Each structure stands twice: as C-alpha cells, then as structure tokens.
Image (cartoon, rainbow, N blue to C red):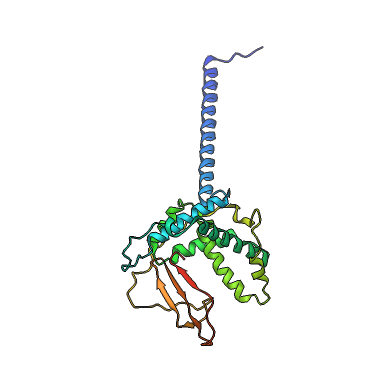
C-alpha cells in the first residue's frame, strides 16, 4: 500500500531545499571574497617579482635625466658673465655613454673578481641608505622623479653606479696582485651580468626629511672607513651638487703627489 505525501510536506521540503541552496551559495561567495582579500594582502606584503631588461640606450637616457638634476643644482659662479649653459652644451652624448659603460664594466669586473654579481639585496640596501641618510632630500626626490619613481630603474641607474664605485675602491685597496685592475680592462660582454636583466621585487624607499640645515663653516666628524688617503695642498671646489678635490700630495710624503681625484655627490 503506497503512502501519499501531503501537499504541505512537499511544499516544506521544497522550501528547505531552496534555503539550503541559498545558504551554500552565500557560503561560496564568502569563501571567494575571503580568498581574494587574502591574495590581495599577500601581493601587498610581497610584491610580485619583475622580469625586466634595460637596454644600453635606455640606461644612457636615464643617465642624462640624472645628470640634468645634478646640473640644475650646480652653482654657476657669479663671476661668469655668461648665463648658465644647458646640460647638452657641457656634456656630450659620448660622455653619457662612457659613464654608463664605466659602471657596467666595473659591475662586470666585480662579478669576475669576486665570482658573484651585485645582488638585488645590495641594491635595495643602497636605495634604503640613500633615502635614510641623504643630506638634501629635495634633490633625491627630484632624482627619483626623474627616473619615474620606478624602484627598478632607480636601483639599476642610480644605486648601482654609486654602490659599484664604493665596491671598486674597496677591491682596488685590497687587491695586491693587480687581478681586479686587469678585470676592469676587459670589454663589456654582450649581456653584462644581471645588470641588463633582473627578476626582482624592489620597493621604493621613503625619503627622510634629512638632517637640519647646514651651518656655514662648521663640520661634523665622519667615519674614516674606506676614506681616501690623507693629503695636503689640495684644491677643492663645491659645485652645489658635489665636492671635487684634486691636485694634492699625500700626507705620508711631501714628494708623493696624489694621483686620484675625489668626487662626492650629495645623492649618496
């Protein structure tokens, strides 16, 4: 004998199934939203790695942008009756290309000499150092803006030359065999190390407000680590963007002239 289901029971079952479907749909939507938010948070904390390349021509263009900022802040002597010339009038394309070639060649020499390239971590640390310890934050902001506030470009075209220069000085001071100097004379490879291709995730550092304004005719003691040799009878000039010292004799011997020229830029 078959039992008949009353219409009321069938209606209740239909309503229950509909409610269950709505509950499951709501739970599914919540799960999707939570997953998307979590993925967004992870991407914020750990920005995706970038695989990018810079051609030599792009590096030269960025170098010109850097030099243009330095040139705008360079003091033009009041004694000069002519107006301050443009950057193009004082720096040729060949000079810009040489600057880029020099820091790429030095980067390559450091890799060959130390058997490891300059790492992304070192470049990020150099950017952080500049941002935290700059004496003229407004100039550093202009440099960052000239490079599009792009951390990859800033790392490769501003931080790399400065870091390379310091590492080269250290290597030359420690190398007693001349092997590093020999590595510097090699021609650039077609794809010089990781300088032309990188897969990294740089972050743009926040620029500090810098130290209080300088007071004329006052000096603050600095570390002598990796400093140039002591010298006397030198000539020095402040250009508004860098200090240049040349034409001295070493302090150890009054008869030994200093063959190097010291240039210290404000961005570093």
Residue shown at 45%/52% (left/top)?
149
Vertical order, 267 against 35 (above or below): below
Residue occupying image coordinates x 54% and y 41%: 35
User: Camera-side residue: 201 or 252?
Assistant: 252
| Residue in the picture at 61% in, 72% down | 171
Looking at the image, is 132 positioned above or below residue 215? above
Q: Could you tell whether 217 is left or right of 245 in the image?
A: left
Which is nearer the eye, 118 or 70?
70
Q: Looking at the picture, tell me which residue is in the foreground, 17 or 204.
A: 204
Question: Which residue is situated farthest in the front direction here?
Answer: 81
Q: Position of residue 25 (x, y in %)?
A: 53, 30
Query: In the image, residue 101 lies at what x, y percent?
Result: 57, 59
Q: Is residue 96 left or right of residue 172?
A: left
Q: Total marks drawn?
A: 0
Q: Position of residue 143 (x, y in %)?
A: 43, 57
Query: Does any portion of residue 51 appear in the rendered image?
Result: no
Residue 234, compared with residue 26, is above or below; it is below
Specify the farthest residue to the top. 1
Left or right, 220 with respect to 166, comes to: left
Instruction: Give the image location of residue 154, x and y in percent.
Output: 50, 56
Q: Is residue 267 visible?
A: yes
Quadrant occupied by the N terminus: top right
Q: Quadrant of residue 210?
A: bottom left
Q: Looking at the image, which residue is at 45% across and 50% down?
A: 148
Relative depth, front residue between 90 and 10? 90
């Amino acid at each position: 004998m078959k039992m008949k289901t009353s219409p009321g029971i069938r209606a209740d079952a239909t309503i229950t199934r509909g409610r269950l479907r709505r509950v499951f749909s709501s739970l599914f939507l919540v799960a999707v939203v939570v997953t998307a938010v979590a993925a967004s948070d992870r991407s914020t904390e750990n920005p995706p790695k970038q695989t990018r390349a810079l051609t030599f021509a792009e590096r030269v263009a960025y170098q010109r942008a850097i030099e243009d900022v330095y040139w705008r802040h360079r003091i033009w002597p009041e004694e000069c009756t002519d107006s301050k010339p443009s950057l193009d009038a004082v720096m040729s394309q060949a000079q810009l290309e040489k600057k880029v070639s020099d820091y790429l060649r030095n980067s390559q020499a450091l890799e060959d000499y130390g058997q490891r390239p300059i790492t992304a971590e070192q470049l990020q640390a150099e950017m952080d150092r500049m941002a935290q310890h700059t004496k003229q934050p407004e100039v550093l902001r202009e440099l960052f803006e000239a490079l599009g506030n792009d951390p990859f470009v800033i790392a490769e075209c501003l931080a790399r030359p400065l870091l390379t220069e310091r590492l080269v000085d250290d290597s030359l001071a420690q190398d007693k065999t001349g092997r590093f100097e020999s590595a510097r004379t090699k021609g650039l490879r077609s794809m010089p190390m990781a300088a032309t291709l990188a897969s990294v995730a740089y972050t743009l550092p926040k620029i500090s407000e810098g130290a209080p304004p300088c007071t004329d005719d006052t000096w603050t003691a600095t570390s002598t680590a990796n400093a140039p040799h002591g010298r006397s009878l030198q000539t020095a000039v402040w250009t508004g963007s860098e200090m240049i010292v040349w034409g001295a004799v070493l302090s150890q011997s009054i008869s030994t002239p200093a063959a190097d020229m010291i240039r210290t830029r404000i961005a570093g």
